[in-house]
Amino acid sequence: MLRFVLGRVLVLIPTFIGVSIIAFAFIRLLPGDPVMLMSGERVMDPERYQRIMHQLGYDRPMPVQYFDYLIGLLSGDFGTSIVTRRPVVQDFFALFPATLELSFCAIVFAVVLGVPAGVLAAVKRGSFYDQAIMSVALVGYSMPIFWWGILLIILFSGILGWTPVSGRISLMYFFPSVTGFMLIDALISGQSGAFRSALSHLILPTIVLGTIPLAVIARQTRSAMLEVLSEDYVRTARAKGLPPSRVVGLHALRNALIPVVTTIGLQVGVLMAGAILTESIFSWPGIGKWMIDSVSKRDYPVIQGGLLIIAAIIMLVNLIVDLLYGLINPRIRHH
Amino acid sequence: MVLKRLTQAALLGVSLAALAGAGASAKTLVYCSEGSPEGFDPGIYTAGTTFDASSRTVYNRLLEFEHGKTSTAPALAESWDISDDGLEYTFHLRPGVKFQTTDFFTPTRDFNADDVVFSFERQLKTDNPWNQYVAGAAWEYSAGMGFPDLIKSVEKVDDLTVKFVLNHPEAPFLADLAMDFASIMSKEYADKLAADGKMEQLNQMPLGTGPFEFVAYEPDAVIRYRAHEEYWPGKEKIDDLVFAITTDAAVRAQKLQAGECHIMPYPNAADVAGLEANADLTVMKQEGLNVAYLAYNTLIAPFDKPEVRKALNMAINKQAIVDAVFQGAATPAKNPIPPTMWSYNDAIQDDPYDPEAAKAALEAAGAAGLSMKVWAMPVSRPYMLNAKRAAELIQEDFAKIGVTVEIVSFEWAEYLERSKAKDRDGAVILGWTGDNGDPDNFLDVLLGCDAVGGNNRAQWCNEEFDKLVSDAKVISDQAERTKLYEEAQVIFKREAPWATLDHSLVVMPMSKKVTGFVMDPLGIHRFDGVDITE
């Protein structure tokens, strides 16, 4: 088991270096640079431009800049934002709880609805339920997040007035952030109605961010269930005279869940990508919105640092999923 | 750590509860702002979003732009004397002006000359300890307005008198002092931060003499302000001001309609009709302090002939561009400066849209069957939302008079750089948004001889025009300057270095409960003087 874990961890090192190169190089491939964008239509005289570029160290050869960056990374220094002048790590962890809270709710939403829907579709294969669930899943998967978000806002906030339009909590509540998780902070604050307000602000973004994972999980559960349901041991269980709920719920579902767990793990990446758009729509102060803003301002350190930390988190989650997988299915760790 | 934060939270909770109890009828204005401020020190940034959240709420300046105008009025300086040679400006400061008393700082003295000297020296002197208190601070606006070369010294004469000595006379200097970057900071607060080793806090927790005091900022989400109790013109009518940061324009519009905020900037053009139809809302409109233009390269034949440029200008259907690109949220431009700016010459007649006459004029000038390039910006700017579309319309217009147009574009930074070249092939679509409401900021910056090869994209150097504009720059009397600028606009129209395209409209939808909001031609959002009725 230890060898298995070590092997998995070792693979992460070259991956991490690869990501650092991509993060570093890609943002520099984008036209324009932070200093150019500072001056807009105004013409900054070339001397001044050079001086500021020099101050920021962007006039040095790329490999030197990268090497410097790597050295900084090794000592835990992810750089300082060119715009806000705050350390990237500080900003990241100030905003990350908001993203985590939203992502967590979204994945719970996706699993709680997606797994039963997939099971139902598999058990009633070919039925109206199956057709309906799979069509909805296909639509959900293909839905542009941006459009979906606005649509929900117009319907539920604009026309029906059931949910707030955007933000994390009503502006009338004002308390300091302790954990960064609004639901918990609202409870701690003891202000009546705060928790309810935070919860109502979570509904629409959760649905929007959870839609794609929901569709993926439902489809994956369905196909895994179909495969398992045709296995010999399921037929045996049926032949033994077990009630169908026990056959499906215990024997089939447990085995079908293995690929589903992997899929859920992979959704972390999807959630991060989705968070960028979802957060922009719902004015959700998380890292997705933070990254988008820094791309438009060419804030190199933020984009590099942000991408790396996100990549590290995704790699970590995948590692945990791999290890869990090994636990669930011993054959894997011996291979 | 967590325990400490919990204790702090509990304490703050108690004090907030007390506050809420005391001000049960507190008036709160919620502004759905379009983005997060980069920081709260207006000296080191250039974005309007940052200025709205810092200089216009927390700070004052020696002079202020009059509400809704581009002219200036006394503020922290009650009056000033200018020496005959225009090199010495002596400001007499307003006595008894209080800095804000906040949770994080209690001032012990009133505003005085030390604060003024501090506020400018930190920008001008590279050896000032505050010059690089945030690493890489570029003081972009101070540099952009030429302050390091212009200002020789800033001296304290006595507690309430400050003298600026300039290296050369400069009439727009007073207008420059009303700009955001010239906001006056508290030296006492800065000294305290330096002593505590917390200099960066100046950019995170601002403190000034302005109408509102800073309370808290939750990054990317909410900024909270309270009315400054001892504000020198009197306390504001609203008690609390909240910026709810909402980056998406469609979502801002929804929030406004749902009553989650009272006022919003920059709606989508497509949403404006819907907002206007809402009986609970008012939609204010005004020409922005901007212009979009098509600049010919006047150094290259046949565009060196004014007749050719005039003929082409007559072929452009500006109204069609305004309709297609702005859905009406703009007005066709006839002058290089916007109508809200003082000295705008409204007597000037625009070239009529007349393809037949244009064709004849082009033939008469010997340029029939011309082919040319039109450069279209790759980005959307407030004065030109879609330059590619505008270029296509111009292409169609020119085709009608037998001129073949090839549309070219480059990535934005490259576009700005390449379009400066004196040997540039083609006419460039570009524009400008004013900084300080002074006509010099358009006419000299964009059309002066010194700007050829730089901001003067028409590469146009007309001695007559340049003399008028240069003379106006060193005269202090606004009436005299107005005459010169009006005349300069006549020459501009006659010589036609640009086809002036449009001035975009700035649209501000707000709740009918909001009273006293004045649209600002400089594009600033100010909340002093605003009230809400319940």
Image: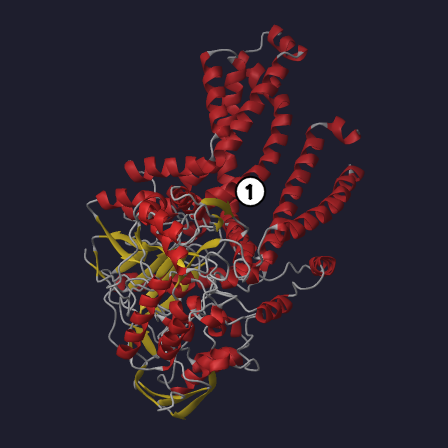
Q: Assign the N terminus of chain A to one quadrant of the image.
A: top right
The image quarter containing residue B334 is bottom left
Give the camera-side residue of B149 and B51: B149
Q: Assign the C terminus of chain A to one quadrant of the image.
A: top right
Q: How many marks?
A: 1
Residue type for callout 1: Met
Tell me the chain of label 1.
A
Say left or right for B23 vs B222: left
Say left or right for B274 vs B60: left
Q: Is residue A277 visible?
A: yes
Give the camera-side residue of B336 and A307: B336
Q: Is residue A109 visible?
A: no
Residue at x 65%, y 47% (from the top left corner): A312
The image quarter containing residue B19 is bottom left
Vertical placement of residue B459 versus A11, above or below: below
Q: Where's residue B214, x and y in %?
A: 38, 67
Say left or right for B205 vs A332: left
The image quarter containing residue A265 is top right
The residue most toward the bottom is: B158
Vertical placement of residue B228 versus B77, above or below: above
Q: Where's residue A141, x and y in %?
A: 51, 29
Residue at x 62%, y 68% (from the top left corner): A50
Give the camera-side residue of B298 and A33: B298
Say left or right for B427 vs A269: left
Q: Where's residue A35, x and y in %?
A: 56, 63
Label 1, secondary structure: give it.
helix
* Residue wearing tag 1: A272
Q: Where's residue A13, x and y in %?
A: 75, 47
